[in-house]
Amino acid sequence: MPLAPVQQTKQLLQEAQEWGMWTWASETNKDRVRSGIESATEALEREVEKTKRSWGKALQKAYAGAEADLKIKRSVWRLRDAEEEMNRATAQSKATFAEAERQLDAGQARQGVAEALRAIELHETVLELARRLAS
């Protein structure tokens, strides 16, 4: 089931990819984008944490680094790899947005939007992997 803040943010970011410099220069629009990204990220993170709390003790221990069955370890490694990729993508999008704002560069802001969309999609992947581990 899609999370409403995530879907709303993805829609806003798709619109923002078409914005020109004057639209990007508006503090209201910058705040909408920032707020949307934060809301989507928080909603996804809450769901990931809720899902992880639903895991059995053995899976929680395996995620924490304890010895586990090879199949479980591989699944946990896939999840951890996805989390690392998501964190890198999130950091990259933040850096791109900061640089775009510093230079007042609409093209770079659009690049930041594309990177933020990718980070949100990676976060959705992390949630899906966590849910698969729960089942």
Image (cartoon, helix red, strand yellow):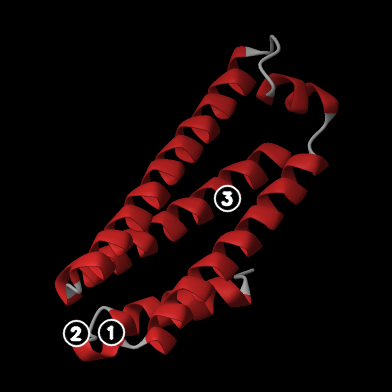
The quarter of the picture where the N terminus appears is bottom right
> On the image, numbered disc 2 is attached to which residue?
21
**SS class, disc 3:** helix
* Residue at x-position 66% and y-position 16%: 65
Give the percent coordinates (x, y) of residue 23. 27, 90
Q: Are marks 1 and 2 in contact (CB under 8 Å)?
A: yes
The quarter of the picture where the C terminus appears is top right
> On the image, numbered disc 1 is attached to which residue?
25
Mark 1–mark 2 distance (CA, rounded to whole Å) = 6 Å
Amino acid carrying mark 3 in the image: Glu
Q: Earlier in the sequence, mark 1 or mark 3?
A: 1
* Residue at x-position 52% and y-position 56%: 124
Give the percent coordinates (x, y) of residue 40. 56, 67
Mark 2–mark 3 distance (CA, rounded to whole Å) = 36 Å
Give the percent coordinates (x, y) of residue 72. 63, 22
Q: Is residue 20 visible?
A: no
Mark 1–mark 3 distance (CA, rounded to whole Å) = 36 Å
Q: Is residue 60 visible?
A: yes
> On the image, numbered disc 3 is attached to which residue?
128
- Is residue 26 shown above or below 97? below
- Is residue 129 shown above or below 38? above
Amino acid carrying mark 1 in the image: Ala
Disc 1 or disc 3, which is closer to the eye? 1
Badge 3: few (under 14), some or many (20 or more) residues near its Cα, within 10 Å? some
Disc 2 or disc 3, which is closer to the eye? 2
Q: Are marks 1 and 3 in contact (CB under 8 Å)?
A: no
Which is more toward the observer, 116 or 20?
20
